[in-house]
Amino acid sequence: MTLAPEGGAHQSLTTPSIGLEQPECTAWEPAFAQDLEWCMLEAMSRIGIPGGRSAYFRLTTRPLDQSLAALPTDAVLLERRRRHAVAGGYRLSDHDPVEDRVTLVGVGAMMPEVIASAARLKSLGITAGVICLTSPDLVFESLQSRNSPNPETKAIGLDIVDVLFPRHAPSPLVTVQDGHPHTLSFLAGARGDRTISLGVRDFGQSSDLQDAYRIHGIDEASIVNAALNLVR
């Protein structure tokens, strides 16, 4: 829907799922420029080598405020952010995950709405964690590898699913993607959390961006409403 002003012919709801399911190919959907640089370099380092893999990047023409990435200024914390980004995602919220009453999970172009929704929930007295996924594909691999005895199924990088969704800190999840909602529904299995998955089930409209988001239930109001339905 993010491409709505450019016409319905450019819209697709199945692309994220296809990217996640393509074998020997890592699907990426970074939101911010620094994430794109890190993930692109990581992807390039795995091309043309034994055991390497191809990469698919799903990007957007929507301009995003880069300050929303809240990049750490400390070198150690910045490197930690980079490692998490190339492993599949990172927490944008700086409070302890145990404080989450609800956790908002966003991908790519949806991050401004996710971040704004967390701020709105805070004004209502509800602490919302914010997770930015750079690659749902790698997070799914991490989840799959958790109890797998087969080393070939091990995900690239660290066990990012346990970093993002620590089992000692469960909370309801609201997932948001400009794509079919089932793409992120697997996250319910990370900790057994109650989950509402928001996304796009239809396409073809050409409209103002905010109207498109509202029609398909991926705007700020829809995200806040989903979170409230889970915590109240």
Image (cartoon, rainbow, N blue to C red):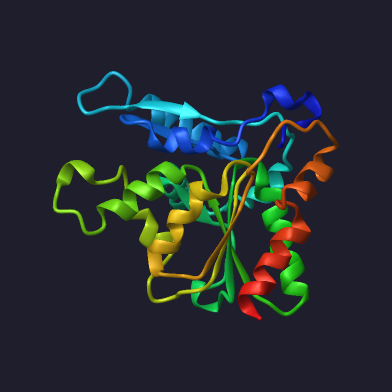
Q: Is residue 46 left or right of residue 201?
A: left
Q: Position of residue 199 (x, y in %)?
A: 62, 48
Q: Is residue 47 left or right of residue 228?
A: left
Q: Nearer the viewer, residue 141 or 97?
A: 141
Query: Is residue 215 positioned above or below 6 on the image?
Result: below
Q: Residue at x 72, y 47 (%)?
A: 216
The N terminus appears in which quarter of the rendering? top right
Q: Nearer the viewer, residue 148 or 65?
A: 148
Q: Position of residue 157 (x, y in %)?
A: 32, 45
Query: Is residue 232 positioned above or below 10 on the image?
Result: below
Q: Is residue 16 left or right of residue 142?
A: right
Q: Residue at x 46, y 27 (%)?
A: 56
Q: Nearer the viewer, residue 157 or 218?
A: 218
Q: Residue at x 72, y 65 (%)?
A: 224
Instruction: Work out whether residue 162 can be spotted.
Output: yes
Q: Quadrant of residue 62?
A: top right
The C terminus appears in which quarter of the rendering? bottom right
Number of residue marks? 0
Q: Position of residue 21 (x, y in %)?
A: 39, 36
Q: Residue at x 63, y 69 (%)?
A: 128
